[in-house]
Image: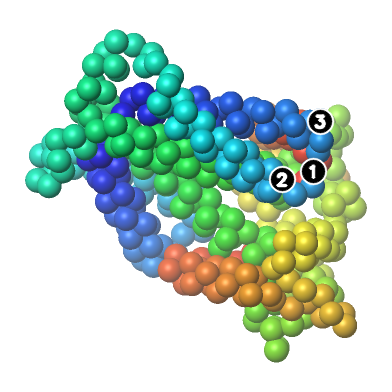
Amino acid sequence: MVHGLLVAVIVSLVWIVLQNLVMHVHPMENRFKPMVLGYLLSFPFVFVFYRWLPPVTNSIANTMEHEAWMMGLFHAYLLHLLLFFFYVQCFYHVERSVTLRILVELLQHAGQGVSLAGLQQQYSLEDMISNRLEVMRDRGLVSFQNGQWRLQFNGRLLAQVAMAGAWLFQAKHQHERM
Amino acid sequence: MKGLLISLLALAGFVLTSAGAAWCFRPRRYLKLFAITFLLWIPIYFVLYRATPPDLCFLPSAWMCTDQRVDMLYGFVVFALNWHSVVDSFTGIIGGFSVALLVATRNSPAQQTTTTALIANFKLEDGADRIYNWRLPELERLGYVVRTAGDGTYRLTAKGRWVARIAWFAKRSLNLSVGG
């Protein structure tokens, strides 16, 4: 199992670094697709490395003799998947967080303070909403016809999941806060 | 395999405990709630692992990890990664800005709305917006920013500057624009 876990970590690190290098050379607005592509392309390498990469130590090789070969591969693929989820989640924390955007804006004006009006001028509520709606239209979550935004199937499903989750945890959505 | 199965059990326990605590305490900060319940379930995970038989009374010997400590640690890592997924799903879906727009549209008459009406959803009665007027006092309360008494401008504290630098560096490393 240890061999499989090490393979999962190695393959994950390699594809994540390579995918980010590619994004420096050919930046793309929608990063989700290259992330999924990177994950899928790395998929066969988990098997290849697990099968042919020699175990790092003799003790790992010894333990492999007592464990089912397929079970080690299963754990390798499971950890590979969980690390993919973790990477995607961390990516969107950094990319989409409005709070981090505010902090970075303040950092860029470190010498002098920024007023609320100044922050809103840099990144207004209207801009935030318009940008998000455009992104969601590109992703097929909403459509825009005759001046009206409508939910597509995936958008409606996501809204319903969010409402069910809010009920489960007794939480409020952002437009209901304050 | 035992570590994985116990970690899934601990995750289910964590979700149920968090939901139960949310109903009882109606917390203001959910991340704190999730952190506390996670800290509560960490020792429970290890106790469960120690207290149960190595084969859980049904696992074939070939499915069991030879080194129990490795299996226990692996199960904990899976538990931590799954915990992060749950918390991220919460912040991204239930507490996310984009999803709030979808929910607002879903709750509009005939489930359709205009950009102006969506913007109005994020405005308070006095015209102030919920995004900045909720976040800035929160950031101030948590010690990331400080509001100057004289001119009312906001500045980063040392803690806020540290987080902002990490965010800036992460955005640069990932070749991202300002985002948000």
Going 88% across and 49% down the picture, which residue do you hit?
A122
Q: Which mark is residue A28?
A: 1
The answer to whether residue B43 is left or right of residue A143 is left
Residue at figure coordinates x 62%, y 46% from the top left: A36
Label 1 vs label 3: CA separation? 10 Å
Q: Which mark is residue A31?
A: 2
Examine the image and state in which quarter residue A31 appears. Answer: top right
Residue type highlighted by circle 3: Val
Q: Are marks 1 and 3 in contact (CB under 8 Å)?
A: no
- Element on which disc 3 rests: helix
Element class at badge 1: loop
Q: Are marks 2 and 1 in contact (CB under 8 Å)?
A: yes
* Marks 3 and 2 on same chain: yes
Find numbered disc 2 in the image and state the secondary structure of the residue it sits on: loop
The spot of residue A91 in percent (x, y) is 64, 41
User: Percent x, y for residue A42?
Assistant: 56, 35
Q: Are marks 2 and 1 on the same chain?
A: yes
